[in-house]
């Protein structure tokens, strides 16, 4: 399968905007109508435009993922990468996409924004991917399939072999959102990128790296795809502060590893405690930093927690997550308070 056949022809032939800081970043810079007066903030020079090619950051991301700098490109959160995917592959009102639901809601919102029809392929009753069923029923206009592994809001990993089966047997683009991969027991699919030119991974510093406010996510894909992303992204999509802080965070992995280990430990403890609470019907296995659980009177439990300032996510109305709530793993004392209140409300609501 030739990936260029999936890329919109206008993007293939697009002559992108050439920005001033593309080639030169040092010297007597009189080319970009910037201010000549130095303006520094925490060691970051602010009067000059930042590097549109994100060279230093991409080198750090390449080092972290084990890929080459040409295989990675960063956006203002991985949500920006979703935007590039629609721009590069989907002709509005003509091309179509698919998602394996229940899953992260942003894929659907993006499809609506771009006026791209979205087909929902249900995960099975254990929230597992059924690649065979998708392969035999995918409508011909579907160009991109969005998967999320570990999946939000269910928490489970999709089976690696099923994903790779899609990559090898389907002629479309397979996007795997790995926002929570650092919390899982399985490695990223980054190692499979060389084998599958139709695979795109979404990663982020918003979760394990504890940097949601930075707005730093990235795509991992073939150089052919990342070069199209470079064409469609705003030239200076990332500011210099975000890039510098991102590079530092990527170099500071010991702290991240320690925090991830603590969250995983807490996840198992909270899951065990939830299971013991009368009225909690099921706690779903999780490879992420949150838990999905089904309980009696779910939306009432949610409401009472909310009134006490304990905010979790109500998923009880979703067709595939009926009666379910999703809770993020917090600090041990926050988790304790959450558990105590859930136990209390479920006891009260029994009467
Ligand atoms: C599966 C998934 N992907 C992506 C994101 C957003 O990532 P970012 O903050 O990098 O835009 C989220 C946020 O909750 C998510 O759950």
Image (cartoon, rainbow, N blue to C red):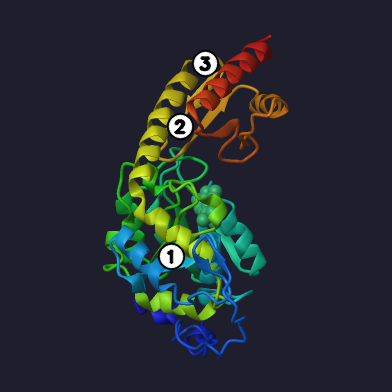
State the residue in front, 68 or 222: 68
Tell me, yes or no, whether the two marked residues, 3 and 1, touch with CB atoms within 8 Å. no
Q: Is residue 155 left or right of residue 236?
A: left
- Which of the labelled discs sits on residue 139, or is there none? none
Distance CA(mark 1)–CA(mark 2): 29 Å
Q: Residues within 10 Å of mark 2 (few under 14, many from 20)?
A: some
Distance CA(mark 3)–CA(mark 1): 41 Å
Residue 11 percent across, percent down from the top left:
51, 84
Q: Is residue 186 left or right of residue 157?
A: left
State the residue in front, 264 or 132: 264
> Tag 1 or tag 3, which sits nearer the N-term?
1
For the residue with label 2, is its CB less than 8 Å from the closest atom of ligand 1?
no
Distance CA(mark 3)–CA(mark 2): 14 Å
The residue tagged 2 is: 284
Label 2 sits on a secondary structure element that is: loop
For the residue with label 1, is its CB less than 8 Å from the closest atom of ligand 1?
no
Nearer to us: label 3 or label 1: 1
- Which of the labelled discs sits on residue 219, or is there none? 1
In the rendered image, the residue lying farthest to the top is 351
Residue 63 percent across, percent down from the top left:
30, 62
The residue tagged 3 is: 277
> Tag 2 or tag 1, which sits nearer the N-term?
1
The residue that appears at 41% across and 81% down in the rendered structure is 4
Q: Is residue 39 above or below residue 149?
A: below
């Amino acid at each position: 399968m030739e990936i260029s056949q999936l890329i919109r022809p206008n993007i293939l032939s697009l002559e992108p905007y050439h920005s001033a800081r593309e080639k030169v970043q040092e010297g007597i810079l009189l080319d970009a109508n910037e201010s000549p007066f130095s303006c520094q903030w925490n060691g970051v020079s602010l009067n000059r435009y930042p590097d549109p090619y994100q060279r230093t950051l991409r080198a750090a991301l390449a080092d972290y993922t084990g890929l080459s700098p040409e295989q990675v490109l960063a956006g203002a959160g991985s949500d920006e990468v979703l935007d590039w995917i629609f721009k590069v592959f989907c002709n509005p009102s003509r091309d179509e996409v698919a998602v394996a639901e229940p899953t992260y809601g942003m894929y659907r919102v993006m499809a609506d924004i771009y006026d791209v029809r979205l087909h929902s392929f249900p995960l099975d009753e254990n929230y597992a991917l059924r690649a065979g069923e998708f392969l035999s029923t995918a409508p011909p206009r579907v160009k991109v399939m969005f998967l999320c592994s570990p999946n939000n809001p269910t928490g489970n990993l999709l089976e690696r072999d099923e994903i790779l089966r899609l990559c090898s047997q389907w002629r479309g683009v397979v996007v795997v959102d790995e926002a929570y991969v650092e919390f899982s027991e399985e490695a990223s699919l980054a190692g499979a990128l060389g084998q599958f030119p139709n695979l795109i991974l979404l990663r982020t510093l918003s979760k394990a790296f504890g940097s949601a406010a930075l707005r730093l996510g990235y795509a991992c894909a073939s150089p052919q795809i990342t070069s199209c992303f470079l064409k469609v992204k705003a030239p200076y999509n990332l500011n210099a502060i975000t890039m510098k802080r991102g590079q530092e965070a990527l170099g500071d992995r010991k702290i991240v590893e320690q925090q991830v280990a603590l969250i995983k430990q807490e996840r198992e403890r909270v899951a065990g405690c939830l299971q013991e609470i009368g009225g909690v019907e099921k706690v779903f296995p999780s490879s992420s930093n949150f838990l999905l659980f089904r309980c009696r009177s779910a939306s009432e439990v949610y409401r009472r927690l909310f009134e006490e300032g304990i905010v979790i996510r109500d998923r009880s109305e979703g067709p595939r997550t009926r009666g379910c709530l999703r809770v993020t793993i917090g600090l041990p004392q926050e988790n304790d308070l959450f558990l105590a209140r859930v136990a209390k409300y479920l006891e009260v609501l029994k009467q």
